[in-house]
Image: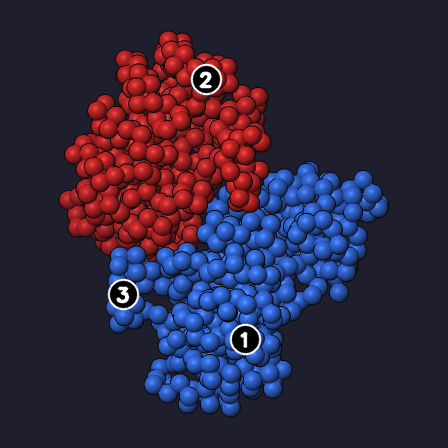
Chain colours: A red, B blue
Amino acid sequence: MRSGSLALTNIGQLVTNDPSREGLLGVVADAGVIVIDGIISWVGAAADLPETPDVIDCDGAAVVPGFVDPHTHLAFAGDRADEFGRRLRGESYEEIMAAGGGIRSTVAATRAATTGDLTSATLDRARRMQAAGTTTVEVKSGYGLDLEHEKRLLAVAAAAGSAIALDVVPTFLGAHTVPPEFAGDADGFVDHLVEVVLPECAPLARFCDVFCDKGVFTVDQARRVLLAGKEHGLLPRLHANQLARSGGVQLAVELGAMSADHLDHLADEDIAALSAAETVAVLLPGVSFSLRLPQARGRDLWDAGVTVALGTDCNPGTSHIETMPFVIALACLEMGLTPEEALWSATRGGALALGLEDRGHIIPGARGDLVVLAHTSYVHLAYRPDAPPVAKVIKRGLRV
Amino acid sequence: MRSGSLALTNIGQLVTNDPSREGLLGVVADAGVIVIDGIISWVGAAADLPETPDVIDCDGAAVVPGFVDPHTHLAFAGDRADEFGRRLRGESYEEIMAAGGGIRSTVAATRAATTGDLTSATLDRARRMQAAGTTTVEVKSGYGLDLEHEKRLLAVAAAAGSAIALDVVPTFLGAHTVPPEFAGDADGFVDHLVEVVLPECAPLARFCDVFCDKGVFTVDQARRVLLAGKEHGLLPRLHANQLARSGGVQLAVELGAMSADHLDHLADEDIAALSAAETVAVLLPGVSFSLRLPQARGRDLWDAGVTVALGTDCNPGTSHIETMPFVIALACLEMGLTPEEALWSATRGGALALGLEDRGHIIPGARGDLVVLAHTSYVHLAYRPDAPPVAKVIKRGLRV
């Protein structure tokens, strides 16, 4: 698809995530990489780099795989700064809802926005994500909640991604909350989703997601939506156990979901269930940080052998965070992951959470998605939380 | 000094910190400001703005006073990412010291750096601070620890500030740690500081600071340095109670110190002592965030009526943080301040901590240091911790 070749040389520290190399990150010192037609074709010692025309000298800097952010709500209009301020001043969730806050305020703003404004706001966020090293991002619908607006969100997400060569993986999250027109009738809304909305949105999405939690959608409602999604070719993933031990983990495992996300309320048996399954645990430390809540048990999930991924959960209500280096810093400083575990989870973990075998690592045959850091060590990603140490972002072998 | 005038109009939300106006922040809606010759000359409703030649239309954005960062170690060479990574992997402080970490590794790197490299590194950090809205920054020496290198650090800090029109307030912190050449002889080092180093550094500084804490300098040693500083015209400020209840608060109050900084270990009686004094409490939430420690009792200090300021403590070991918006976010999310308290502390609080009556507020007669935000509300400063919402920085009436 892309033509031409690009080589990187004098990479002080190349993070490959190659399990055939040493350590979790498979670091190669003094390395070089060649990308041909968008695909990594060679990885090795800089001294052995074959002759190539277009070479970037990294001057000793670290190079890591492009970040894969597996959980975002990137496409929305408006903001919820007012709600955020009220929360910090001590108002309760009920008071905030009464003042017009919560997901539904974003649904109203998103439905009311012109497609031009919605695309422009989404694109601005996508650009900041990309500038900080994200090369693949999952984007959920879920602020439309009817056929017209759910389709529009998926189209807007795709348009934003293709405008800047950022790979967008679309997820249908029609079951994000019950919209006002179905107030008090969640089952009726699920009927409508399954019969009317999902069939027409499915061709625009790859995954189906449900906010399965206390006060949102029940396990039975979530199962119904996810099974309907499967019938339309959408793989299941799940907002699980964010607000309570709501049975989301067990449903995710039962359905073979690609990921179970959030996981703020986990008993030991939930961790055991995840460690016996293939489902990836997607952790979103920006949410707990932004809500002043305890972090999910990321350390315990790692230690139990669960595959962990990290995401921004970029959304206007609970995590207005766009950049993966900041998420890595939070995962280290607030969740107790090591810099190595956090970086792996932000790259290879994210790719596995999205079922994308071809990225999140730097090995021959993988996508040529790489980030050249502004420093000699990837530890800088966590070390300087307000200065993302990204010098160059390379997408499919081309500098973006 | 500066000539010409500048007006801002269509300010949706002007944070004045003017106590004659309503609320802590004295917010004026739909406001305008005029700066003449670097000094604010008029504040009022945009509709009443007198005719002026050079007008910036803020298009409804919020405008706040320039941030005053009252505690940094901006001038240093090298980094301590390796030490940071070791800490996250579970190594103890003793192991890290044995591996060459700690303040002394920065002293060695700073002494070894050329003046050009030291200035360049300092200037890079200063630029990022300024781009995020800091218009006045305190900078401490303390990585030189001998006459030649302490003088050089103060000169480098001044040079970095004047290169970019960032006001640098210099502090002599010769008593930051005991250098290798005085190992085991802290009293001998204090003699040397007081007799040799301080007299020659004093003309380059405004304040004198000491790291008075468990395992560093005792209260008696700190008193000796600070009193000597006073004799040379330097006002005292103090690293106090960071590592333990070490008596630093009582010493700060006894000497009428301008500020007591860190304050991570406070008993109720320490808070009472501060609330009965004029000494400003300078809180540095980036440190506890970076070290995975509990935050200082910022909420309790506010509630006790203590004047609180916020700073970055920018340094390579314990808080590699440069931007005040991120510090505001941490103060809200980790320390429990409201967005209003955090913003006041990052502007007027910082000015009071440095004894600078002429800034940190937007009133006629104050310095024309202002930050135009990229949003309509100052709450965005805390709401989006990885995207400092700064559109324009204005220093003494000139856009930087």
**Element under disc 3:** loop
Q: What amino acid is labelled 3 in the image?
A: Ser
Residue receiving disc 2: A184
Q: Nearer the viewer, residue B21 or A352?
A: B21
Residue beneath the point at 72% across and 45% down: B28
- Same-subunit check for callouts 2 and 1: no
Residue beneath the point at 78% across and 42% down: B46
In the current view of this chain or complex, which residue is farthest to the top? A195
Q: Residues within 10 Å of mark 1 (few under 14, many from 20)?
A: many
Q: Residues within 10 Å of mark 3 (few under 14, many from 20)?
A: few
Q: Nearer the viewer, residue A53 or B178?
A: B178
Q: Residues within 10 Å of mark 2 (few under 14, many from 20)?
A: few
Residue receiving disc 3: B92
Residue beneath the point at 19% across and 50% down: A23
Residue receiving disc 1: B252
- Observer able to see residue B241: yes
- Quadrant of the image occupied by residue A353: top left
Residue A268: x and y in percent read 22, 40
Residue B335: x and y in percent read 48, 54
